[in-house]
Image: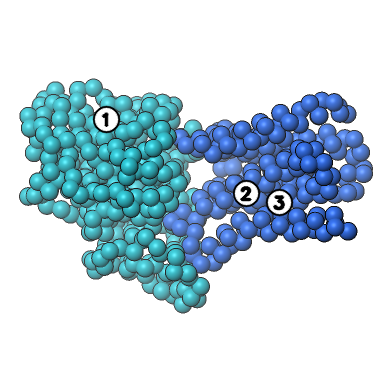
Chain colours: A blue, B cyan
Amino acid sequence: MRQKRAVLALKTLLWIGALAPGAYLVSEFLTGSLGANPVEKLTRWTGMAALVLLITSLAVSPARRLTGWNPLIKLRRPLGLFAFFYAGIHFVIWFAFYNVFDLGYMWADIIERRFVTAGMAAFVVMLPLAATSTQWAIRKLKKRWGLLHRGAYLAGILGVVHYFWLVKADTRLPWVFAIVLAALLAFRLPQLQRTKP
Amino acid sequence: MIIRRKPDISSSEITPEGVYLNRRTFVKKAAAAGVIGSALGPQALAGATPRQEIHPRFATLSSEMDEPLNSYEEITTYNNFYEFGTRKSDPAENSGAFNPRPWKVQIGGLVNKPGDYELDDILSGITMEDRVYRLRCVEAWSMVIPWYGFPLSALINKVEPQPSARYIEMKTIVRPDEMPGQRFPILDWPYIEGLRMDEAMHPLTILATGVYGMDLPNQNGAPLRLVVPWKYGFKGVKSIQSINFVEEMPVNTWQVQNANEYGFFANVNPDVSHPRWSQARETRLPGFRKDFETMMFNGYTDQVQHLYAGMDLARWK
């Protein structure tokens, strides 16, 4: 009973935290406070939210092992889906405003610019993960589900690379993400190797 | 060539401004303000309200292509000035401690009258004027800005360059105590930019001391900055501490940072892509859509193309 309540509290915090950037952006939009370059602000915030949530979702399993508290795993799916949610908005903003709904512009952007290539690849990797996030899919795919969902690490790596290639000079924050991601991978790799499907 | 921009549904139209705006946009804004204006929090305009009231002459001022001016708030809260931080909001937020007066400009190199010139002495006897220019950032956004300043040629003539001076090199001041961005080696400080002498002497090239007829706020490069409207915005070195007349082409900061991306000339050119984005289109702020067709030399082709006759602009980018 106490455990259930703790999980519920954590989930509530997660929902509040994950929805906060979106709520902030909506309120800034409605009050006309997005600044001189509204689209840039929307793009940066949604990209940042997606990356933070994705990497947080990758931290769930290590945290579960370190604490030995298994119910933590219940946070992983909502974190991953919220990451996908922001990545999707990020994608739509880019398509709608930067590429003005033009598929030709979009394609040129993807193949000509490596930071877009990496970002697009991260999003594409996330698509099947989001699509197979249901209990039904987990049952159906059995062992293959675990293998497929290792794609979350790939998406994380691509996301960080996207960020690195995007910034002009100030790579401090991309480095923070890279180091956190590397630490998570280092923690998980021995375990993943042991449980080869 | 007159290019009229379709008015977007832009955030400015739903953003009441604390400043007086161009008459055309003012009418639209006033209409929109009635609908959404009451939701605006007081924090939105913090730091962006000019100290003096904007002179009425700006109500009717527009570019030579009849483009409306960006608002004072837009121009002074969205800046690339890494000396104060790398986010666009950083310069407005972190430049409060910067002290632009008194100010001296060191002039040296191949000139007959080198020396440390007081800014007030430089400005005495010089006629200041409003210059409405498009500012095209290499990041593919643009604004229309009413600078206040004077042609760089006026200063150059004053100090008498020698015939061997083929380029000028300009540096931003280094004051890590007042410029928090300089406490990290994000760029190789000081920020260095340069121009070929004919570019520097071109009548469109100005040194600005103000915007909207008032002194430049610190975040815009107080007290003195370069504006070269047919080049990408990063050429416009801010808070200029020194001007050096040299024989060799200076190596500007962004070339040191990444030689693949930014060249010395950096003329606005829709046909030469930046490795990370196309330069064919731009977002005219505060609009949302990147659907404004970028113009060769940022629309100043007639005035400046002779400077580059015979040059391969894809190579000299």
Residue B49 appears left or right of B307: right
Which residue corresponds to mark 2?
A: A49
**Residue occupying the far bottom of the picture:** B34
Mark 2 and mark 3: Cα distance apart in space? 9 Å
The answer to whether residue A39 is visible is: yes
Instruction: Confirm or deny contact between disc 2 and disc 3 (CB under 8 A).
Output: yes
When asked about the image quadrant of residue B232, the answer is top left
Mark sitting earlier along the chain (2/3): 2
Asked whether the residues under marks 2 and 1 belong to the same chain, the reply is no
Which residue corresponds to mark 3?
A: A82
Question: What is the secondary structure assignment of the residue under circle 2?
Answer: helix
Could you say which is closer to the camera, residue B90 or residue B216?
B90
Residue appearing at x 43%, y 28% in the figure: B258
Which residue corresponds to mark 1?
A: B309
| Spot occupied by residue A78 in the image (x, y as percentages of width and height) | 76, 51
Question: Above or below — where is B30 with respect to A135?
Answer: below
Question: What is the secondary structure assignment of the residue under circle 3?
Answer: helix
| Spot occupied by residue A58 in the image (x, y as percentages of width and height) | 73, 40
Q: How many discs mark residues in the rendered view?
A: 3
Task: Tell me the kind of residue under disc 3.
Answer: Phe
Mark 1 and mark 3: Cα distance apart in space? 54 Å
| Spot occupied by residue B5 in the image (x, y as percentages of width and height) | 41, 57
Residue B279 appears left or right of A15: left
